[in-house]
Image: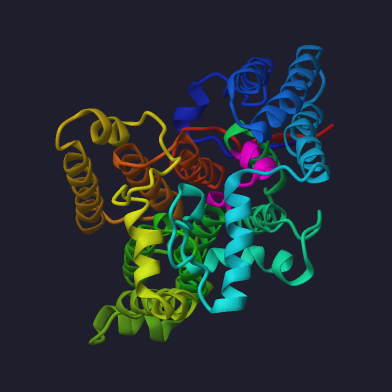
Amino acid sequence: MATTTPLTPPDQHRGPPPRLGGALWWALCATAALGLAVFSALGPHRVWGAAAALGYLAAALLTARGRSPRIAGAVALAGAVPLPLLWLLAVDLAQLEVRVVARSAGLLLAEGTPYLQHPVVPEDFNPYLPGMAVFGLPEALAGPGPFTDPRLWMGAAFLGALAFALPAGDRSAPLRWIAACPLVALPLAVGGVDLPVAGLMCLGLALAGRGRAGAAGLALGAAAALKWTAWPAIPVALALLAAASRSTSAGRPADGGEGLGGSRRPADRREGLGGSRRPADRAAARCGLVALLTAAALVLPAALRDPGAFRAHVVDFPLGLTDAVSSAASPLPGHLLATHVPGGRTLALLLLGVSALLLALSLLLRPPATASDAAARLALGLLLAIAFMPASRFGYLVHPLVLAVWAAARQTPGHPLLVRVGKQVSR
């Protein structure tokens, strides 16, 4: 039995879309994983690369032999996530950020702030907002162990949020593909603070697309309390809510046929067309207020406890303004400018500001009409930000990747997919 997307007229003249789970795709994943196993200087990455390469290679061979994409994807996923994760948990090996999160939770319980007062070396710094310490609380309360490891809770938060953000009847196939993708599977196994942020951003945009302004604000506020990279999602969601509400007020259902709050009450339509304040204004204001209050409740207590430490950890260190150099040093344009060009740090920050301004103008001049459009807009903005940040790394690309794939997985027939991940075949 096959679940397919209804064809639009242009689709009827095209050949079948390429299958993302093909043998070539898994072979490329195996090559990337093997390269990481051979050339990486980080122990957790080498372990992941060796295990994932086996899983991806097995998936490529199964696909080449004609086995179903479901079986091949399950094999790839098993080799890329559970196998290396269980091994790393058994030998107590993790990426540095896992230990940073665990330490921040202990500091939060003991001193009321997750930040060391006098950080010296890069390992002393905690560049995450106070909400990230939540994932280290199980270890801080119950002690180190395989079931209290922060990466388990970060991965669970990511997968749970993303599952709720996907369409109810079509979750397993895109969720399985996203989790098996090397850029996601690697942090799921070795530890990735960016994953729960990406999952909550998708969930916030999905809720905003359904007109659930308050719930969207809660999800986006929680994401904003984890990392600065989640903050651009708030204005994108506000623009989406405003545009969707205006469309509903004009008599057109927004984003999948739902009006604001999942219904189209006559009173709301009358107020939207002739009232002094449209539902669009109230929905966006409610979402923004809830998001800001949620983020403030999670961030301000720790920030006010020691403002100097807060600034040093989450502002100065990520921007490269401290004596300690961040390990986030992938050769992206912003880092190359800051390192090799006189005045390059200022130029990189200027380009970062210009990117943010362009995103804001695009939201004002052409607001997103659907949650998928909003996710694509946010993915582009984050991609530019990652490129121009003075201290950045390739792992941050998980944000635009997850947003783009999620947007493609929930596209409507009137919006052609850039990536086809919603096709699921079962036998």
- Using the rendered view, name the quadrant where residue 268 is placed: bottom left
Q: Nearer the viewer, residue 359 or 276?
A: 359
State how many labels appear: 0
Q: Quadrant of the C terminus?
A: top right
Seen at 75% across and 34% down, the residue is 77
Seen at 72% across and 42% down, the residue is 93
Residue 280 locus on image (x, y percent):
33, 74
Task: Please determine whether, in this image, residue 23 is positioned above or below residue 91.
Answer: above
Q: Nearer the viewer, residue 70 or 231?
A: 231
- Using the rendered view, name the quadrant where residue 42 is placed: top right
In the picture, measured across the screen, residue 273 lies left or right of residue 147, that is left
Task: Please determine whether, in this image, residue 182 is positioned above or below residue 156.
Answer: above
Residue 426 locus on image (x, y percent):
80, 34
In the picture, measured across the screen, residue 164 lies left or right of residue 145, that is left
Task: Please determine whether, in this image, residue 134 is positioned above or below residue 80.
Answer: below
Q: Nearer the viewer, residue 386 or 255?
A: 386
Seen at 54% across and 46% down, the residue is 406
Residue 101 locus on image (x, y percent):
59, 59
Seen at 76% across and 40% down, the residue is 88
Does 192 lie within the magenta span?
Answer: yes
Magenta-colored segment: predominant secondary structure: helix
Q: Can residue 82 be seen at all in this image of the molecule?
A: yes
- Bounds of the magenta span? 184-195
Residue 400 locus on image (x, y percent):
45, 42
Q: Can residue 258 be seen at all in this image of the molecule?
A: no
Q: Quadrant of the N terminus?
A: top right
